């Protein structure tokens, strides 16, 4: 058996460190003799709702619809809010995003439930969260069974919610602007 010299180990560690620093993932690593080292981009393939079979999409949407109904029931339970947590606005209703997306929001005190819908495909995501001042933070789950966090801010006139939806699976942050 050939013994690997320490200089090669250091050299290999430097190469791997540089690759990781630039966001690459080591895909292949074959040592001694055949010294093959492969890097790949760690970006995830784009997921489209069209890629789901009709049966799988219907099953996931039925599950999201059932869970949204449960979230709404929980939100509508009497809430105990401290004076500094009281909210003087109501987000309940339908909000509209880019394209044809719509968002059903149910609010009770400083707690909210949200459902995102696309007229072509139906329910795309659901979530629940709370209001802190003019900010709304919502944890959501998508039809892809991934999760994310919505950070939204209400404009002073109460007609626009702006912020980002950040998918915790991919780390991708999507800017959003919702209008009443």
Image: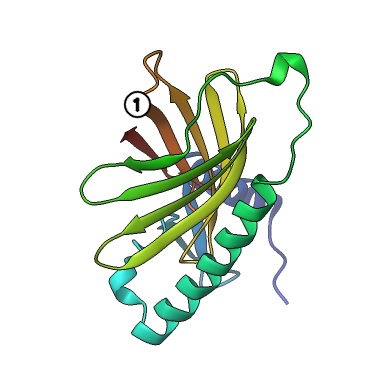
Image location of residue 135, percent across then percent down = 54, 24
Q: Is residue 87 left or right of residue 85?
A: left
Residue at the image point whose x is 20% and y is 47% from the top: 99
**Front-most of residues 37 and 26:** 26
Residue placed farthest to the bottom in the image? 55
Quarter of image, res 139: top right
Residue denoted by label 1:
160
**Front-most of residues 149 and 128:** 128
Image location of residue 76, percent across then percent down = 65, 46
Image coloring type? rainbow
Image location of residue 49, percent across then percent down = 33, 68
- Circle 1: element type: strand
- Number of numbered labels in the structure image: 1
Q: Considering the image in quadrants, where does the C terminus appear? A: top left
Q: Considering the image in quadrants, where does the N terminus appear? A: bottom right
Residue at the image point whose x is 46% and y is 57% from the top: 125
Q: Is residue 27 left or right of residue 79?
A: left
Residue 135 appears in the rendering: yes
Residue placed farthest to the left in the image? 99
**Front-most of residues 9 and 179:** 179
Image location of residue 50, percent across then percent down = 28, 73
**Circle 1 residues within 10 Å: few <14, some 14–19, many ≥20:** some
Residue 29 appears in the rendering: no
Q: Is residue 33 left or right of residue 152?
A: right
Q: Is residue 37 above or below residue 52?
A: above
Residue at the image point whose x is 47% and y is 66% from the top: 144
Q: Is residue 48 above or below residue 113?
A: below
Residue at the image point whose x is 47% and y is 38% from the top: 92
């Amino acid at each position: 058996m050939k013994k690997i010299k320490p200089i090669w180990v250091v050299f290999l560690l430097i190469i791997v460190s540089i690759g990781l620093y630039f966001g690459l993932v080591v895909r292949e690593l074959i040592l001694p003799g055949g010294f093959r080292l492969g890097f790949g981009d760690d970006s995830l393939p784009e997921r489209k709702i069209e890629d789901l079979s009709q049966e799988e999409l219907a099953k996931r949407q039925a599950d999201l619809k059932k869970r949204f109904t449960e979230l709404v029931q929980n939100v509508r339970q009497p809430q105990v809010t401290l004076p500094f947590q009281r909210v003087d606005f109501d987000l309940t209703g339908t909000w509209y995003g880019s394209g044809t997306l719509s968002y059903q929001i149910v609010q009770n005190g400083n707690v909210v439930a949200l459902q995102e819908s696309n007229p072509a495909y139906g329910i795309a995501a659901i979530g629940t969260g709370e209001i802190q001042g003019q900010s709304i933070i919502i944890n959501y789950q998508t039809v892809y069974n991934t999760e994310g966090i919505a950070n939204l801010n209400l404009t002073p006139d109460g007609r626009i919610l702006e912020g980002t939806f950040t998918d915790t699976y991919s780390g991708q942050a999507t800017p959003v602007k919702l209008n009443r």
